[in-house]
Image (cartoon, grey):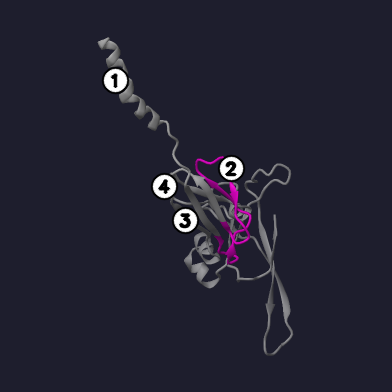
Amino acid sequence: MRARRMMIGAMLVFAPGTFFAQSPAPKTSRIVGIVIDSLHQSGLEGAEVIVSGLASPVTTDSLGRFSVDSLVPGTYQVGVFHPLIESLGLTLASKPFNVGRDSTGVVSLAIPSATTLASRYCGKEVTAAHPAVVAGRVLDPDTDVPVSAAKISLAWVDMVVSKDDPLMHQEDEKHEPEIGEDHQEPSQLVVKLGLQVGLPWLADI
């Protein structure tokens, strides 16, 4: 009889602890954010936003905004994928951050400006005189596999205006720019050439 009383007492002590350990965490947290396209000075529409720990991505709206609801409290990280980001050879992701219970985590991510990208690819001296750069990727049209050792040339038209000759005349130029050596991956080719902002150009590959 004494052994049975001890067994019942043990059950009464440990049963409540077991019950609380199995209770799921409440999904009362959320993440909201915005992705900015600094190149076009607008929100990045149609970007795929991945939140760590979640299987399904969300998509930014016409203003670059997104939201993820019904999250359990914890540590999260946000990554953004878009053809423009990929063509620039950039990785756009937040640092890990904590979201508490009944709280909202706010994320703001942005593609760097043209000046920042030009300085990164060409250096500050070239960027100061010609704050523009051409950057992109060369893919095989059938397989979408990056093409290595591709030769790229750029052609454009200079418009010249003078007091003696008020009519504009064109001077066609073609250059074979230097490929950026700081990007070893075949998927990223950077044209290191000072260009005027807004200058129309044609690339031959």
Q: Is residue 40 magenta?
A: yes
Counting residues from the start of the chain, the first of labels 1 and 3 encountered is: 1
- Alpha-carbon span between mark 1 and mark 3: 49 Å
Q: Nearer the viewer, residue 204 or 86?
A: 86
Report the magenta residues as a range: 36-65
Counting residues from the start of the chain, the first of labels 3 and 2 encountered is: 2
- Alpha-carbon span between mark 1 and mark 2: 47 Å
- Alpha-carbon span between mark 3 and mark 2: 19 Å
Q: Is residue 105 magenta?
A: no
Counting residues from the start of the chain, the first of labels 3 and 4 encountered is: 4
Residue neighbourhood size for the residue with mark 2, other residues' Cα within 10 Å, grouped as few (<14), some (14–19), many (≥20)? few
Q: Nearer the viewer, mark 3 or mark 4?
A: 4
- Please report contact status of discs 2 and 4: CB closer than 8 Å, yes or no: no
Q: Amino acid at mark 1?
A: Gly
Q: Amino acid at mark 2?
A: Ser
Counting residues from the start of the chain, the first of labels 2 and 4 encountered is: 2
Q: Which residue is mark 4?
A: 101
- Alpha-carbon span between mark 3 and mark 4: 14 Å
Return the mark for residue 56: 2
Mark 4 lies on a secondary structure that is loop
Q: Residue at the spot x=74%, y=85% of the render? A: 167
Q: Nearer the viewer, residue 184 or 131?
A: 131
Instruction: Report the label total.
Output: 4
Q: Amino acid at mark 4?
A: Arg
